[in-house]
Image (cartoon, helix red, strand yellow):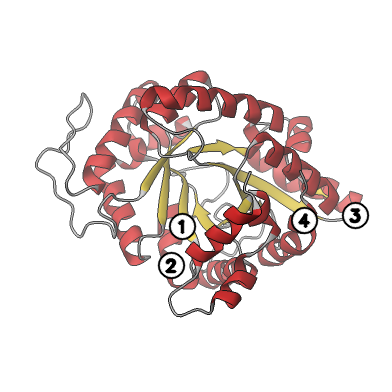
Amino acid sequence: MLHRLDAVRIIGQLTTAGEDENAAAARHSRRDLIWGMDFGAHLPLMDFGGNPYTLRHLVDYAERAAGLGFRALSANDHMVFSVPWLDGPTALAAVISHSGDMTLATTVSLPVIRGPVPLAKTLAAIDRLSGGRLVAAIGPGSSQQDYDAAGVDFLERWARTDESIQALRALLRPDAPPFVGRFYSTEGINLEPHPSRQEGPQLWVGSWGSDAGLRRTARLGDGWLASAYNTTPELFGGAWARLRELLPEHGRDPDSFPNALATMWFYITEDHGEADRVMHERVVPTVHRPEDLLRQRLPVGSAELFAEKLSAFASAGVQRVFVWPIADEANQLERFWETVSPAIAL
């Protein structure tokens, strides 16, 4: 958990060039920084019903998130899905100039589906065009449909994921030695222009919290990305404790290793009937999980309910939560910022 002095230090680091320090402090000294949990916003890429899929829609959303004070903006990745899904990297690139100083994140990217070389080229461009604001979370994805569409054996996803992370590091760091593995080789490949930073963007590992996933994160990741609808505060806390035990074995400091929670789908309403309709008509047919599990894990309902869930995750050690409104996206972001984030307590 961040203490107040830590928050002051972070506020100083976030001050933009030429910006008055008092103005920066007012802009960044939110309760989320002081208490050690901050917030990112998922771009609305999937269709819960009525998504217009226009650039204006994405731009309005990104500008609202930046104006409210969200610290990150993210896009995740699917090739095919049960509902329409806008291409994540393309959408993230499209709103760079409207994203303020927010971190840009992938939650997650699919190097096995896209191929490490094409994905590295895309990530390097997003990082460079954003002035080095990219954090790329990497994972195998959970959909066999994506693998079938790409012509890749679904049973090879884990071995390929391990290699693809190492290949991405070699491709995104101009001074890194080439990687040569069973599936991928970066020997003789020099992707220019390079990312903004010599060390390249951070590469986090996406894992729902399995022992194998946590070992992969400790071995290969610069951070851990968990999934909100696939965990609970109790499950996350246990996995975070196990990961902290594993990190020193790989020369990592558990006290500086970051984590985040993605795909926190939500809809804030004080109307119980509306909450039931949103859950039953929009969430359940789209997410394909048992309705009772989704009701338990996703905050569809009152602001108080959402604040209680996030408070529990904060106590379990979650550092950042990427929220994703199910409908009326930009207005729901504002409602979250004004009614939920101030109510989170430890």
Residue type, numbered disc 2: Ile
In the displayed image of the protein, which residue is found farthest to the front? 5
Q: Residue at x 27, y 57 (%)?
A: 195
Locate residue 98, reporting x and y percent. 49, 72
Q: For the residues marked 1 and 2, what is the alpha-carbon distance in whole angstroms?
A: 8 Å
Locate residue 51, reporting x and y percent. 61, 60
* Local secondary structure at mark 2: helix
Residue underneath mark 1: 104
Ranked by sequence position, the earlier of labels 2 and 3 is 2
Res. 87 in view: no
Ranked by sequence position, the earlier of labels 4 and 3 is 3
Question: Disc 2 vs disc 3: Cβ atoms closer than 8 Å?
Answer: no
Residue underneath mark 4: 340
Q: Nearer the viewer, mark 2 or mark 3?
A: 2
Q: Which of these two is toward me, 45 or 220?
A: 220
Q: For the residues marked 1 and 3, what is the alpha-carbon distance in whole angstroms?
A: 34 Å
Ranked by sequence position, the earlier of labels 4 and 1 is 1
Q: Residue at x 90, y 54 (%)?
A: 271
Q: Residue at x 40, y 22 (%)?
A: 249
Q: For the residues marked 4 and 3, what is the alpha-carbon distance in whole angstroms?
A: 16 Å
Residue type, numbered disc 3: Asp
Locate residue 65, reporting x and y percent. 60, 66
- The label on residue 147 is none
Q: Quadrant of the N terminus?
A: top right
Residue underneath mark 3: 271
Tell me: residue 51, above or below residue 141: below
Ranked by sequence position, the earlier of labels 1 and 2 is 2
Q: Which of these two is toward me, 54 or 240?
A: 240
The image quadrant of residue 186 is top left
- The label on residue 96 is 2
